[in-house]
Every structure is written in structure tokens, then in C-alpha cells.
Image: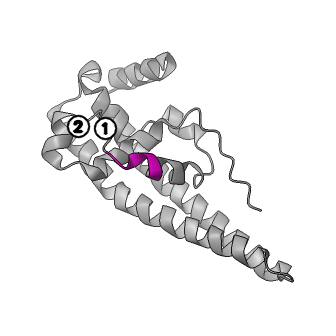
């Protein structure tokens, strides 16, 4: 059976996924409210990312939208962060779906009476590669947001993270 345990305490990055379900006007008006249906996506992503603790250091777009006033984000920064979110969300959703399908295939295959360990291993390697790619793609989006900040805003982000 696949070990699906991932530390969940620092999954701030998951919040930014909500952007995909907001029309731009709604998102701008109330960026901190996750839309209906996000719980399922959050649960799926929690098991598909290898190193979630790094996302706590570099939060994602929803964190910035939620804290836009406190961070004193400019309208230009907000628009760029929204663009990053709208780019990564469909990618993340596809990756999560593919990873979950492959995990289910693996579990089904390995439940057979005489599975081939060689084939099972190939499937596990494929799952690991997809999870690593998803984590890397997601981290890029988080870093892209972080790099939009001024040095003072970066300090404020770290202070906010420590408070949470």
C-alpha cells in the first residue's frame, strides 16, 4: 500500500488554490474566502506533494490576497499574483488528478493475486516523478509571488507566517 502521509500542519500553500473557483471580480472583492468544493481539492493535494514544509516559508497567492492590506501590496503586485494563481491552478488540478489515477491503478494492480514487482516498481517510480514535478511546479508559483515583494514586504511575510 502507498504511504499517503504528508505533514499537514504547514499547508498554507493549499489556500491559494481557491483562486481558480473565483471569477476575477469576486476574488478581488473577497480573496480570503475559499469557495465551495475546495475541501476535496485540498485533501487531494495534501497527499500529492512531497515536501510541503517549504510552502510554509514561501506561501502562495491566497496568502498574499488574504494579507494584501497588511502587506501593503500594490495593485500591480495583486494583479501579478492573481495571474500566477490563474496559471498554476489548472496545472495543479490536472497533476493531482493524474497522480490519484495512477495511485489507484497501482493499488488495484498490486491487489492482484500475483502482481509483478517489476511492473509495480515502475508504477511507483512514475508516481514519484509526477509528485516531484507537481511539487516543483507549485513551488515555482510560490517563489514567483515571493519575488514580487519588496524587502520590507518579505520581512512582513515572514513575521505573518511566524504568527500563524
Say if 162 sits above or below 86 in the image: above
**Circles 1 and 2: CB atoms closer than 8 Å:** yes
Q: Separation of disc 1 and disc 2 at Cα?
A: 7 Å
Say if 94 sits above or below 8 in the image: below
Residue 52 lies, in percent from the top left, at 58, 43
- Name the secondary structure under disc 1: loop
Residue 40 lies, in percent from the top left, at 46, 51
- Name the secondary structure under disc 2: helix
The numbered disc on residue 148 is 1
Let me know if residue 38 is in the magenta part. yes
Left or right? Give the position of 152 relative to 58: left
Residue 112 lies, in percent from the top left, at 80, 80
Q: Nearer the viewer, residue 124 or 44?
A: 44
Residue reaching furthest to the left: 25
| Residue at image location 44% in from the left, 46% down from the top | 39
Let me know if residue 73 is in the magenta part. no
| Residue at image location 50% in from the left, 61% down from the top | 96
- Quadrant housing residue 68: top left
Q: Which residues are magenta?
A: 36-40
Camera sees residue 147 = no
Q: Nearer the viewer, residue 43 or 162?
A: 43
| Residue at image location 37% in from the left, 50% down from the top | 37
Specify few, some or many for label 1: CA neighbours under 10 Å numbering under 14, 14-19, or 20 or more.
some
- Quadrant housing residue 130: bottom right
- The residue that mark 2 highlights is 77
Amino acid at each position: 500500500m502507498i504511504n499517503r502521509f504528508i505533514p499537514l500542519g504547514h499547508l498554507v500553500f493549499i489556500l491559494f488554490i481557491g483562486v481558480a473557483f473565483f471569477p476575477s471580480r469576486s476574488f478581488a472583492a473577497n480573496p480570503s474566502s475559499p469557495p465551495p468544493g475546495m475541501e476535496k481539492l485540498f485533501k487531494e493535494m495534501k497527499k500529492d506533494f512531497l515536501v510541503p514544509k517549504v510552502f510554509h516559508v514561501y506561501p502562495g497567492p491566497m496568502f498574499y490576497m488574504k494579507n494584501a492590506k497588511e502587506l501593503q501590496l500594490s495593485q500591480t503586485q495583486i494583479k501579478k499574483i492573481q495571474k500566477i494563481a490563474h496559471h498554476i491552478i489548472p496545472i495543479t488540478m490536472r497533476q493531482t488528478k493524474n497522480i490519484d489515477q495512477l495511485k489507484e491503478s497501482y493499488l488495484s494492480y498490486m491487489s492482484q493475486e500475483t502482481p509483478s514487482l517489476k511492473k509495480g516498481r515502475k508504477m511507483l517510480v512514475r508516481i514519484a516523478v509526477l509528485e516531484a514535478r507537481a511539487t516543483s511546479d507549485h513551488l515555482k508559483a510560490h517563489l514567483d509571488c515571493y519575488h514580487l515583494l519588496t524587502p520590507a514586504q518579505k520581512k512582513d511575510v515572514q513575521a505573518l507566517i511566524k504568527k500563524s
